[in-house]
């Protein structure tokens, strides 16, 4: 093997490793600054691939080492679901191996040169094979990197198949290469290799298509669940508002009667009875007098309902709200954001024996709607991939948190969370230039 050939192989290895890491980095955001780890993993992979050219004794199979390296890298340094990171690592390498087998078999079919000679012998044909294979790798991996979707998939038997098939196909190609192609005792007809190469490539493409179909279906189900959750929130909100107004109308209707009773007791000099009667009325009025008036009826209704609910749990509720009558935000979206925020705050406060409080601020500054919610908490949080998750158990719990974030992002807003030992702060800023 000449020096020129060694340098060419190293260049090809750099392109191969680079395309895989490019795809993985595009598919999964970094957990933190991962430039150095990425370069280190790439250097190790390129070095190991280059060393395999010299057939050192006791070297583990390069295919296994490379696959493990890709999986370990995504697990340690990229965000995302574990099974999804493993799936894409395996699928990328399965496509890499499939293309590496497909190209030489097709050139063998065109040129009439046996496939084994095309793959093993150092010749201009093999140079052409390696160049074409890497060009196809770059094109396919670039197309795959453009397809980005929310990570909202749920587990299903179909996804298990999507994971197993690339693993089996990669293993099969490795076996073919090491047992059949490198062993002169086996004479594999080129026709069989043609069928195998095309079959492996088609199978992995079908698996990718199946994966995308499942992803789309899961995304539709998630959207339907979000809409159902929003409908439930709206229905609950309407029921709470009806109760508040009903109680207020009852007290307004009975106000004259109550005053007559108080006046009669005072005229009869029954002051103790009058005082007790007034105290009793005051306690009942306090329970229904929390209807606030800020200028925006949607915010008034939601905050009033949640403030009444918080009061029933002995939660101190303070607010500063200054808004116009109408906002450039859909009422349904505003209702969903405020209801979810306040429900989460009330739930967090209820986990404490005392020191329960909620401070809400909703103002407009420089044509931006600012919402700041501060509530007491026990300091127990759950985070996954750098994002806060619900501590409640159940398949659909935690949808409210994702719904808030999705609504804010739809309006090109900012969603910020600060978790302290005894407090939890949520800040939202939404531009009011136009509707989403």
Image: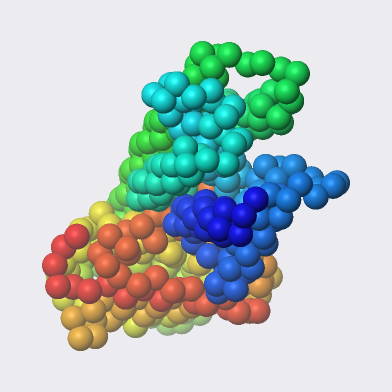
Camera-side residue of 253 and 436: 436
Q: Quadrant of the C terminus?
A: bottom left
Is residue 194 shown above or below 162? Answer: above
> Residue 6 at x, y = what percent?
60, 56
Q: Quadrant of residue 400?
A: bottom left
Q: Residue at x 60, y 73 (%)?
A: 36
**What is the image's colouring?**
rainbow
Q: Is residue 77 something one can see in this rendering?
A: no
Camera-side residue of 87 and 363: 87
Q: Quadrant of residue 188?
A: top right
Q: Residue at x 41, y 35 (%)?
A: 212
Q: Is residue 124 something one can see in this rendering?
A: yes
**Would you say 393 lies left or right of 232 here?**
right
Q: Residue at x 27, y 67 (%)?
A: 412
**Would you say 247 lies left or right of 183 here?**
left
Is residue 278 shown above or below 117? Answer: below
**Would you say 94 lies left or right of 212 here?**
right
Is residue 37 shown above or below 225? Answer: below
> Residue 25 at x, y = what percent?
49, 59
Q: Residue at x 35, y 67 (%)?
A: 303
Looking at the image, the residue that sits furthest to the bottom is 366
All told, the count of numbered labels is 0
**Would you say 250 lies left or right of 158 here?**
left
Camera-side residue of 249 and 20: 20
Camera-side residue of 404 and 196: 196
> Residue 392 at x, y = what percent?
61, 52
């Amino acid at each position: 093997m000449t020096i020129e050939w060694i340098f060419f192989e190293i260049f090809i290895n750099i392109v191969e490793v680079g395309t895989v890491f490019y795809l993985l980095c595009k598919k999964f955001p970094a957990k933190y600054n991962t430039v150095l780890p990425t370069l280190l993993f790439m250097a190790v992979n390129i070095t190991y691939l280059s060393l395999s050219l010299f057939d050192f004794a006791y070297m583990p199979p390069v295919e296994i080492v490379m696959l493990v390296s890709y999986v370990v890298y995504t697990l340690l340094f990229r965000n995302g679901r574990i099974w999804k990171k493993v799936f894409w690592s395996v699928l990328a390498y399965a496509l890499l191996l499939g293309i590496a087998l497909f190209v030489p078999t097709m050139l063998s079919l065109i040129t009439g040169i046996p496939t084994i000679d095309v793959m093993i012998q150092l010749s201009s044909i093999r140079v052409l094979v390696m160049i074409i294979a890497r060009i196809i790798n770059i094109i396919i991996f670039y197309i795959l990197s453009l397809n980005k979707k929310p990570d909202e998939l749920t587990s299903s038997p179909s996804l298990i198949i999507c994971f197993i098939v690339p693993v089996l196909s990669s293993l099969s190609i490795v076996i073919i290469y090491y047992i059949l192609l490198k062993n002169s005792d086996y004479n594999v007809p080129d026709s069989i290799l043609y069928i195998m190469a095309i079959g492996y490539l088609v199978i992995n493409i079908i698996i990718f298509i199946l994966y995308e179909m499942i992803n789309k279906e899961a995304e539709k189900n998630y959207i339907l669940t979000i809409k159902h959750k929003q409908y439930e929130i709206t229905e609950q909100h309407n029921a709470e508002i009806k109760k508040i107004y009903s109680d207020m109308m009852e007290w307004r209707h009975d106000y004259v009667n109550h005053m007559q009773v108080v006046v009669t007791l005072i005229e009869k000099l029954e002051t103790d009875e009058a005082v007790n009667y007034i105290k009793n009325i005051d306690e009942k009025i306090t329970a229904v007098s929390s209807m606030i008036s800020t200028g925006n009826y949607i915010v008034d209704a939601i905050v009033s309902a949640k403030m009444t609910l918080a009061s029933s749990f002995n939660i101190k509720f303070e607010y500063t709200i200054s808004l116009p009558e109408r906002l450039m935000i859909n009422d349904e979206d505003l209702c969903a954001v405020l209801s979810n925020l306040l429900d989460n705050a009330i739930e967090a406060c209820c986990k404490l024996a005392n020191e329960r409080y909620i401070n809400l601020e909703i103002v407009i500054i420089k044509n931006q709607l600012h919402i700041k919610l501060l509530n007491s908490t026990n300091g127990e949080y759950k985070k996954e991939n750098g994002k806060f998750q619900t501590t409640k158990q159940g398949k659909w719990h935690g949808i409210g948190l994702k719904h808030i974030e999705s609504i804010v992002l739809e309006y090109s807003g900012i969603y910020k969370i600060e978790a302290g030992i005894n407090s939890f702060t949520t800040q939202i800023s939404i531009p009011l230039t136009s509707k989403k």
